[in-house]
Amino acid sequence: MIHRDNAAAAIEETLPALQQNNFAAFTTDGAYLVSSATEHDNKSEHIGQYRVKFHFNKVGKTTVMSQAIKDNDNQFTFRKWNPNKLRVSYGCSTEVDSDYLPFCCLCSIIGK
């Protein structure tokens, strides 16, 4: 479970950015911090919801960002975050595009 002081600090620090993007302030839900778009009143897990859980290891500074997505079995999972590839299909790469491979995922599969 996230410590109460850590949760309060995270909620306070992220509030302006969440509000600017029409998301509600984070609330705690067990070990998670949870936020949804302000017009969304569904409290259960859903696409578009931020669910953040912290796990601490003593290895130095690290930042991890991921995107929640439904897999082929309609189960929620995570993949590497790339703000330029928010809507690519499950199973397609979210890696940064290379200057040498100017193809979308589908084009690169068809080209094989």
Image: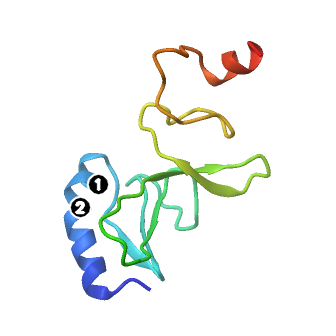
Q: Nearer the viewer, residue 48 or 55?
A: 55
Residue on which disc 1 sits: 18
The reply, left or right, for residue 96 in relation to residue 74 is left
The reply, left or right, for residue 111 in relation to residue 79 is right
Q: Does residue 18 lie above or below 6 as drawn? A: above
Residue on which disc 2 sits: 15
The reply, left or right, for residue 89 in relation to residue 1 is right
Picture quarter with the C terminus: top right
Mark 1 closeness class: few <14, some 14–19, many ≥20 residues within 10 Å: some
Q: Secondary structure at mark 2?
A: helix
Q: Residue 47: give x, y in percent of width and height.
A: 56, 51
Q: Residue 81: give x, y in percent of width and height.
A: 47, 45
Seen at 22% across and 75% down, the residue is 9
Label 2 sits on what residue type? Leu
Picture quarter with the N terminus: bottom left
Seen at 74% across and 21% down, the residue is 109
Label 1 sits on what residue type? Leu
